[in-house]
Image (spheres, rainbow, N blue to C red):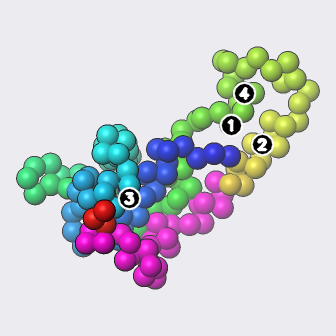
Amino acid sequence: MRITKRTNIAVRLLMYCAANADRLVTKSEIADCCNISENHLAQVINQLSQLGYLHTQRGRNGGMSLGRSADEIRIGDIFREVEGNLPMVECFADADNTCPLINACRLKEALSQAARAFYASLDDISLASLVCDNPALLRILQPVTCTR
């Protein structure tokens, strides 16, 4: 299974916000620290704010912060909501499926079970568990150390 760039950005963004929970953070500092294009980041910020994971504030003193407690944010939910219903293989895409094996192939069910297990394992992980008691990560995600 390959995770999209959007999901990768979403997790980095949320980790940055969790590591800097005491203040509003800016798009430019996240882009700099996490090595993300500001254009890609803006799209993910918009999606995560619509989903309630981020609170955004416009203006000169604007920025963003977590929209929920880091303990309440489950990584499995982030992956599901950001990845959406991307088909893992052609047979998952009902409209575009041209596979002649669809009526006899058992791979689709095996992959469905594997995907459920993958997401279930991520459901056990909170955003807080990725950031809390992780001094090496916290050092990396501080704005002073992020200048490149």
The answer to whether the residue labelled 2 contacts the one labelled 1, judged by CB atoms less than 8 Å apart, is yes
Question: Which of label 4 and label 3 is nearer to you?
Answer: 3
The answer to whether the residue labelled 4 contacts the one labelled 1, judged by CB atoms less than 8 Å apart, is no
Q: Main secondary structure of the magenta part?
A: helix
Q: Is residue 46 above or below residue 139?
A: above
Quadrant hosting residue 25: bottom left
CA–CA distance in space, label 3 to label 1:
27 Å
- Secondary structure of the residue carrying numbered label 2: helix
CA–CA distance in space, label 4 to label 1:
7 Å
Residue marked by disc 4: 90
Q: Position of residue 109 (x, y in %)?
A: 81, 39
Q: Position of residue 41 (x, y in %)?
A: 34, 46
- Compared across the picture, whether 89 is left or right of 31 comes to right
Label located before the other in sequence (2 or 1)? 1
For the record, the magenta segment spans 119-145
- Secondary structure of the residue carrying numbered label 4: helix
Residue marked by disc 3: 34
Quadrant hosting residue 139: bottom left
At horizontal 28% and vertical 65% (from top left) the residue drawn is: 147
Label located before the other in sequence (3 or 1)? 3
* Mark sitting on residue 88: 1
Under mark 3, the amino acid is Cys
At horizontal 65% and vertical 33% (from top left) the residue drawn is: 87
Under mark 1, the amino acid is Met
